Image (cartoon, rainbow, N blue to C red):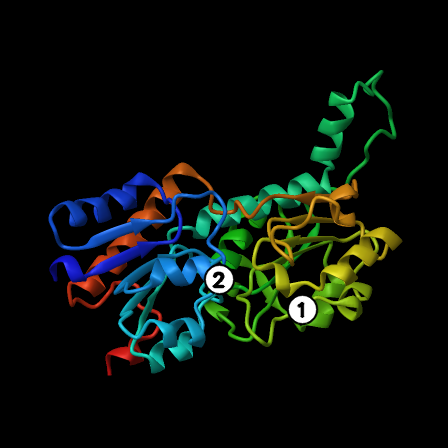
Amino acid sequence: MGENVRVAVTRVIPDAGLNLLRDAAQAGEIELEIWPHELPPQNDELAGLLRGATGALTLVSDRIDGAVLDAEPQLKVVSNFAVGFDNIDVDAATAHGVMVCNTPGVLTETTADMAWALLMAAGRRIVEASDYVRAGNWKTWGPTLLLGHDIHHATLGIIGLGRIGKEVAKRARGFDMEILAYDEYQDETFAAELGVTYVSLDELLARSDFVTLHCALTPETQQLIGREELAKMKSSAVLINAARGPVVDTDALTEALRDGVIWAAGLDVTDPEPIQPDHPLVFMENVVIAPHIASASVDTRDKMAVMAATNLLQAIRGERPTHLVNPDVLG
């Protein structure tokens, strides 16, 4: 290995993982370069950071495509600090002999917690109520002040009943909700145990009081929720997105919230991301927007950092990474 094994980290991650890489560098196993800035490297900066690197630890904001891989033929592993890897062209990576790794499982429950927080905040107008108090508008108790919608006994529609979607379903049971799900792959055993009913997308949209998105971003799910889909929802419905921003057509959602096609939205992700501070969604009282923090608990981010660093070091050391997205790359 030695001095020729260069590792690039595209942002400062929690010390729990970063120290594993620092230890390897201290031992002379790798050369380590860390992008120190708050904002992610732009294309030319990313190219410079990756130049000559054998391994890279990346974030979802770093686009690793065929052009990047063509420019760095010595690159052997890209370890993503995320469960999703839509920022990486996995097919191109496999063709270039580059291992792609991710951090699955560890953020499942934390993300489900955040989705639930968004659901409750949007449904019960929590942010709007807090702003109301901070602005000095609270004069007295009022029988029609800031009325929201009940969550208990409501109908919840889950689009994407994978690991995170299932955890959201478990939380819904505590609120005695009717649970509908739409997913190409159906886990009938789980559905029977939790009382989940699989339905078509159209039926889910029409019946649900709350619709929450937990599908991966793929060509098939790009703008899965557009004008036609929003028009099928109840005018009292709340849309939650803690998946990926491009699953929703942002212009269509803006219009639907403005025109009363749906009642509210809770968003942890947007398209584009970050959303600009002058975007109409930012000023809508019926929208709660968080800056992509669904996995942002201390414990979860530490675990993600350790997992991402471990994946990278395993690949560098000639081992099979524990969380390898493209096993075909090993032949």
Viewer-closest of 23 and 69: 69
Q: Locate residue 100, reporting x and y percent.
A: 34, 68
Amino acid on which the number 2 mark rests in the picture: Asn
Q: Locate residue 325, reporting x and y percent.
A: 35, 70
Q: Is residue 208 above or below residue 97?
A: above
**Residue occupying the point 38% across, 44% down:** 12
Kindly tell me whether residue 149 is visible in this rendering.
no
The N terminus lies in quadrant: bottom left
The image quadrant that residue 252 belongs to is bottom right
The C terminus lies in quadrant: bottom left
1 sits to left or right of 172: left
Amino acid on which the number 1 mark rests in the picture: Gln
Q: Which mark is residue 43?
A: 2
**Residue occupying the point 75% across, 45% down:** 278
Q: Is residue 16 above or below residue 199?
A: above
Viewer-closest of 84 and 174: 84
- Determine crowd level at label 1: few under 14, some 14-19, many 20+ residues with C-alpha closer than 10 A: some
- Residue that carries the numbered disc 1 in the rendered image: 223
